[in-house]
Amino acid sequence: NKLSADRHGLEAYRDSIRSLPKIISVVRDPIERAVSSYKYNYIVPALTRLKRGQGMTASGKQIPGGRTEQFYRDYLYTFEELASAELVTLKKCLEPGGRGETYSYNRHGMRDHMFFHGTFKSRANSSKTPLINLDGACYEA
């Protein structure tokens, strides 16, 4: 019976699949990812706001809306400028005893009920680098 043979073959295939490890890995070029993030998280929203007339220069001058994307390019930071500013921010935040350490310890390490309390305490009393809440310490206003 052909149907029975097909089912048997399908079951054998399913059994072989079940025995394989279930790991899926997606690898992406980190530079490509960073440039994509720059465009998606900075360029697109910035151009949208500028086109609506919601832009302002550092000196407080209103940037006119309704122009072409090329017109606004001079008002935007380049990828290199943003990457450089990011490195300056991180270096300052992550310096020993800096905002990264103090914010994270005060927020998570001093409170007994916090999930990472024990880990913060043990790392503070060892030579291991401290845990840091990067978003909270370095990027919240």
Image (tube, grey):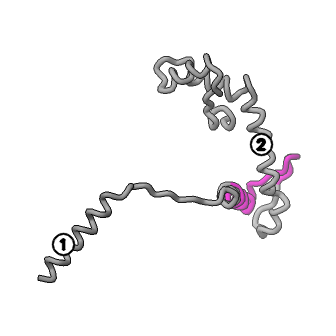
Q: Give the residue furthest to the right.
A: 59
Tell me the quarter of the picture where residue 121 sits. Answer: top right
The answer to which quarter of the image holds residue 54 is bottom right
Query: Relative to the observer, which residue lies in front, 20 or 88?
Result: 20
Residue 115 bears which disc, if any? none
Q: Residue at x 73, y 22 (%)?
A: 97
Q: Which residue is mark 2?
A: 87
Q: Is residue 105 left or right of residue 3?
A: right
Residue 28 percent across, percent down from the top left: 60, 60
The CA span between labels 1 and 2 is 59 Å
Which of the pair 37/46 is nearer the observer? 37
In the rendered image, the vertical position of residue 10 relative to residue 25, given as above or below: below
Badge 1: residue crowd in 10 Å (few <14, some 14–19, many ≥20): few
Pick whichever, 136 or 52, lies toward us: 136
Q: Residue at x 46, y 20 (%)?
A: 113
- Image spot of residue 2 (x, y percent): 15, 83
- Residue 67 magenta: no
Q: Is residue 103 left or right of residue 88?
A: left
x%, y% of residue 75?
83, 57
Q: Secondary structure at mark 2?
A: helix
Say which element carries label 1: helix
Residue positioned most to the left: 1
Residue 8 tag number: 1
Image quarter hosting the N terminus: bottom left
Residue 141: x, y in percent? 69, 34
Q: How many marks?
A: 2
Q: Amino acid at mark 1?
A: His
Mark sitting earlier along the chain (1/2): 1
Callout 1 touching callout 2 (CB < 8 Å) = no
**Mark 2 residue type:** Leu
Q: Which residues are magenta?
A: 42-62
